[in-house]
Amino acid sequence: MTGWRHRGVELRLHAIDWAETQIQKNTKWATTTSEHFLATINDTDNYGMTNLLEYVRHIRNKRVYATSIDLSMISSCLQINIVIYSLHTAYGGSPLVQSQNFFFDSDFSSQVKLWYDAAAEHYEPIMDITTL
């Protein structure tokens, strides 16, 4: 996973290239992701695209916001697990931080933690300051 620091746009394009290859080869990732895409076809995150390949080609435009499919592509392409933390409102109205293993594969040994800012619709990496 090294070598991608400060190269987010290139990483996304690399993952898109990887996803196109997976779709063309009809891999397990492509099949599973296509099924999810079709099951959520009316979701606004799909940008009105009618199939996964059309969607993947559409998001090549760096002005198109990333979605959960982008995270799936990066997770599988780099073979990393992604854990997402976000703020929710608990019972009684108090704030609560929740985590979710968004993409998990027991074969992947590396893990990345992300903070999801719902207001900004943006993900940020969480650094482990104990290793600095």
Image (spheres, helix red, strand yellow):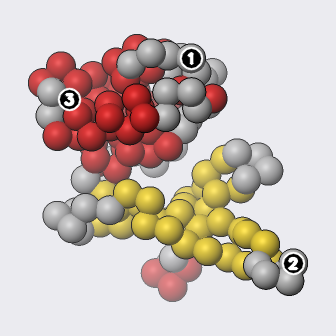
The answer to whether marks 2 and 1 mark residues whose Cβ atoms lie closer than 8 Å is: no
User: What crowding class fits label 3: few (fewer than 14 Cα within 10 Å), some (14-19), or many (20 or more)?
Assistant: some
Q: Nearer the viewer, mark 2 or mark 3?
A: 2
Residue for point 40% across, 14% down: 54
Farthest right residue? Answer: 93
Residue 89 vs residue 122, the one in the foreground: 89
Element type at mark 3: helix
Q: Do the residues labelled 2 and 3 touch (CB within 8 Å)?
A: no
In the rendering, at what x and y percent does residue 118 appear? 73, 53
Front position among marks 3 and 1: 1
Asked if residue 19 shows in the view, the reply is yes
Mark positioned earlier in the residue sequence (3 or 1): 3
User: Which image quarter: residue 106?
Assistant: bottom left
Residue 113 image position (x, y, % from top left):
49, 66
Mark 1 lies on a secondary structure that is: loop
Give coordinates of residue 10: x percent, y percent: 43, 30
Q: Which amino acid does label 2 sit on?
A: Gly
- In space, the residues marked 3 and 1 are separated at their CA atoms by 22 Å
- Please tell me whether residue 102 is drawn above or below residue 73 in the rendered image: below
Residue that numbered label 1 is attached to: 48
Of the numbered discs 2 and 3, the one sitting upstream in the chain is 3
Residue linked to disc 3: 22
Apparent side of residue 21 relative to residue 112 in the rendered image (left or right)? left
Query: Which amino acid, mark 3?
Result: Gln
Of mark 2 and mark 1, the one earlier in the sequence is 1
Judging by the rendered image, the residue that carries numbered circle 2 is 93
* In the displayed structure image, the side of residue 41 where residue 1 appears, left or right: left
Secondary structure type for disc 2: loop
Depth order, front residue of 47/36: 36
